[in-house]
Image (cartoon, grey):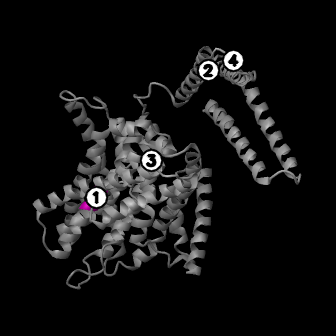
């Protein structure tokens, strides 16, 4: 146990080094981590580090999916709901069918049931990898919303296909009508259980005497409860997390205090970063053990099968994306759609952004070693190897070529009426104007002016005046007055820190209170530097 813990400490240090390399090379870190894992796998010290499917599904998957659900814009999710639902369910099933028949065609003695099992494993783009890479590339908001929404739901549909195919192989029987009924039951009950657990935690946050620490711990426990109770009754734990997470994220300002929201962002940011890093590094580390388990299948043949299926998956997804664009244009004659004329650029990028990830590998690893009759599970090791090749090809090849493709097609977000910087300027201006109007109205109602309120009003007016100056065109060779104000304020904050350090040397002052004011200064610096960053974008 002690040695295993030390191994994971080493892995985290390797993750930090590889992420710094990725930042230096300006690459999405999942790609560098997978390749780094491949390189590290040849060192004997990490030869026994393997992925436990139960560990991935129960330890890693719930918090990562839950965090993704909190990041998704419900407004954008609802806007693109038809496209998201079609790719999360219909396109996954189409991919599974194509993989099933194609694998039977190229792999000798491969049955259709095994083909559907493989299709269910490799069909869904990964919620973690695709969202991480697209955020890094700063793609149009509409594309990111589509990718995040689809990747949240498609794991559920693929795992259901996987579950039914596995049952058919183990029992030797498959009844389509019964399977279709169970499919909808698994989906509906997974959603209901997720919402029920979410309502319970909503009540705990709202009506029990919690503290910021308790609330953050509750957010960490919530996805595990959703997943466990749904899977305990053999329903979709993934859909439970996604639906419950979307509900609670829409109520975040009601159930969490300001302190919980500030602290929670830091806690979740660090946790997800480490978990993401471990997941992608572990993918790369699996290569030696997977190759060793190939058995009678030649390595060259296995690589060919993996590359061929990867190619088919990429082509089918791109064709589905372009087909969905044509269908949206046609159906817009009869119903209102989010985009009546999607064109080919956004669908092409969306189709190319279908990277696979750890959920596929964990599903392949969860295939039992033996059938119900005690015989070795047919083609288990080959399925595992093909899955690894599909993940490697889609993540590395598509991930590396996606930035190039985005530049080549010259994609423009036609739904963005303003740039992100312009939106931020307008939001900040509206906040200041509303605040001044509110205070002026309060003066009129109270009939008397309070000195402190008057100072606050003057401060807001000065800030608005300085802010408006940044919107005016000035000589770029001259330093803008507001920039000078920002730099001076940052210097002032640094002097305040030095003063606090001197105060802390005196015995009569409590160090905990001094740290409190250090934190307040940090928040002020964060606000100023965020504004400076926005102006440089």
4 or 3: mark nearer the eye: 4
Apparent side of residue 452 relative to residue 72 in the rendered image (left or right)? right
Separation (CA) of disc 4 from disc 2: 10 Å
Identify whether 114 is placed above or below 196.
below
Residue most toward the bottom? Answer: 374
Q: Which quarter of the image is occupied by the C terminus?
A: top right
Res. 158 mark: 1
Separation (CA) of disc 2 from disc 3: 34 Å
Q: Which residue is mark 3?
A: 70
Q: Is residue 32 magenta?
A: no
1 or 4: mark nearer the eye: 4
Measured from the top left, where is residue 248 in percent x and y?
41, 47
> Which sits earlier in the primary sequence, circle 1 or circle 3?
3
Res. 439 mark: 2
Res. 449 mark: 4
SS of the residue under disc 4: loop
Report whether residue 130 is seen.
no
Apparent side of residue 371 relative to residue 479 in the rendered image (left or right)? left
Measured from the top left, where is residue 400 in percent x and y?
47, 51
> Which sits earlier in the primary sequence, circle 1 or circle 4?
1
Separation (CA) of disc 4 from disc 3: 43 Å
């Amino acid at each position: 146990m002690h040695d295993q813990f030390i191994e994971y400490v080493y892995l985290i240090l390797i993750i930090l080094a590889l992420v710094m390399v990725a930042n230096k090379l300006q690459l999405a870190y999942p790609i560098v981590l997978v390749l780094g894992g491949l390189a590290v796998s040849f060192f004997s010290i990490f030869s026994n580090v393997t992925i436990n499917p139960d560990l991935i599904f129960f330890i890693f998957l719930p918090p990562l999916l839950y965090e993704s659900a909190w990041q998704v814009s419900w407004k954008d999710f609802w806007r693109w709901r038809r496209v998201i639902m079609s790719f999360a369910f219909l396109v996954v099933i189409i991919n599974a069918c194509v993989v099933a028949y194609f694998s039977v065609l190229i792999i000798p003695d491969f049955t259709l049931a095994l083909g559907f099992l493989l299709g269910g494993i490799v069909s869904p783009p990964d919620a973690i990898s695709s969202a991480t890479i697209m955020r890094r590339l700063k793609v149009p908001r509409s594309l990111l919303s589509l990718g995040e929404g689809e990747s949240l739901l498609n794991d559920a549909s693929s795992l259901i296909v996987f579950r039914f195919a596995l049952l058919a192989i183990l029992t030797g029987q498959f009844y389509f009508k019964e399977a279709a009924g169970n499919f909808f039951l698994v989906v509906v009950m997974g959603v209901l259980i997720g919402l029920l657990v979410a309502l319970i935690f909503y009540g705990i946050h709202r009506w029990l005497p919690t503290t910021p620490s308790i609330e953050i711990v509750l957010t960490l426990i919530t996805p595990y409860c959703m997943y466990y109770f749904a899977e305990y009754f053999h329903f979709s734990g993934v859909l439970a997390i996604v639906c419950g997470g979307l509900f609670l994220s829409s109520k975040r300002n009601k159930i969490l205090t300001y302190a919980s929201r500030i602290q929670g962002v830091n806690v979740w940011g660090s946790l997800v970063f480490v978990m993401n890093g471990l997941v992608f590094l572990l993918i790369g580390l699996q290569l030696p053990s997977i190759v060793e388990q190939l058995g009678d299948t030649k390595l060259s043949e296995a690589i060919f099968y993996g590359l061929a299926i990867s190619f088919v998956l990429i082509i089918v997804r791109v064709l589905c994306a372009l087909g969905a664009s044509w269908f949206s244009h046609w159906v817009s004659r009869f119903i209102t759609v989010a985009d009546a004329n999607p064109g080919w650029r956004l669908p092409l990028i969306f189709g190319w952004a279908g990277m696979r990830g750890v959920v596929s590998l964990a599903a392949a690893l969860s295939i039992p070693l033996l059938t119900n009759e005690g015989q070795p599970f047919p083609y288990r090791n080959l399925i595992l190897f093909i899955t690894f090749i599909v993940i490697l090809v889609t993540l590395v090849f598509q991930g590396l070529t996606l930035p190039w493709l985005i530049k080549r097609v010259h994609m423009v977000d036609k739904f963005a009426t303003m740039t992100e910087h312009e939106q931020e300027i307008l939001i900040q201006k509206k906040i200041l104007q509303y605040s001044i109007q509110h205070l002026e109205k309060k003066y009129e109602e109270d009939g008397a002016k309070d000195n402190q309120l008057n100072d606050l009003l003057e401060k807001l007016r000065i800030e608005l005046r300085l802010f408006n100056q940044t919107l005016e065109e000035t000589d770029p060779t001259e330093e803008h007055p507001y920039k000078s104000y920002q730099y001076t304020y940052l210097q002032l904050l640094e002097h305040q820190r030095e003063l606090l350090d001197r105060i802390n040397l005196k015995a009569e002052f409590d160090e905990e209170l001094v740290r409190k004011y250090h934190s307040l200064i940090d928040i002020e610096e964060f606000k100023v530097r965020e504004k400076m960053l926005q102006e440089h974008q």
